[in-house]
Amino acid sequence: ESLVRWDRAGNEPIGPDVFIPIAEESGLINPIGLNVIRQACTDALHWNDIKLSVNISAAQLRDVEFPINLGQILEEVGFPPERLELEITETCLVLDPVQAERSLDVIRGFGVNIALDDFGTGYASIGFLRMFRFEKLKLDRSLVVDAGIDAGSRAMMVSSISVARALNMAVTAEGVETQQQADLVRSAGCDL
């Protein structure tokens, strides 16, 4: 998974939770995001069959030029689209579902996979899962951690996995840090 950080000479790095909202508000997220995708694809080009995941923001998905720019990057770099997975959050879908669906249809046409990231923290419904046909569902870390200590959270995690399976999605559990958590998500049916 490609992650972007802002390193400032002589200062502490600034995390994406700080600079991404500013980049979205200022309109700089589109050139920053495209640069991240280009660099990640360039870096991962010769990593054999390893898949590359890149997070994209709601603002990028709302940009009607984003799919075109993505296609150009894939062509310029020569990166196999089937090795690229774009991760989007539920917020990307809620803000403008019609534009999101259009963009995702074009992107899928290239052969790029789409994952719904941080599932369990936002607004996505089963209807959204069906409408957008994600290839992968990534369970949020909080759901995984809470599933180990709370029966209700565990039931939510298991039911989320069942829904994903019914919709032919792979499932990844984020934030697994203990053997107990690993055993729990494996027994619930997570792929990764």
Image (spheres, rainbow, N blue to C red):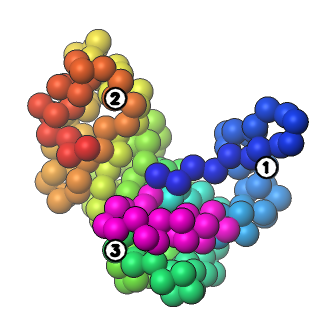
- Which numbered marker is on residue 56? none
User: Does residue 187 appear left or right of residue 46 in this picture?
Assistant: left
SS for callout 2: loop
SS for callout 3: helix
Q: Which residue is mark 2?
A: 176
Q: Residue at x 38, y 57 (%)?
A: 115
Q: Is 52 colored magenta in this rendering?
A: yes
Instruction: Tell me the crowding category of disc 3: few under 14, some 14 to 19, or many 20 or more residues within 10 angstroms, Cα based.
Output: some
Rendered location of residue 100, percent (x, y): 50, 68
| Tag 3 and tag 2, C-beta contact below 8 Å | no
Q: Which residue is mark 3?
A: 82
User: Does residue 44 appear left or right of residue 145 in this picture?
Assistant: right
Which is more toward the observer, 153 or 183?
183
Write down the region rendered in magenta: 35-53
| Tag 2 and tag 1, C-beta contact below 8 Å | no
Which is more toward the observer, 47 or 172?
47
Tag 1 or tag 2, which sits nearer the N-term?
A: 1
Q: Which residue is mark 1?
A: 22
**Above or below, 12 relative to 19:** above
- Say which amino acid is labelled 1: Ile
SS for callout 1: helix
Q: Residue 160: which quarter of the image?
A: top left
Tag 2 or tag 3, which sits nearer the N-term?
A: 3
- Say which amino acid is labelled 2: Val
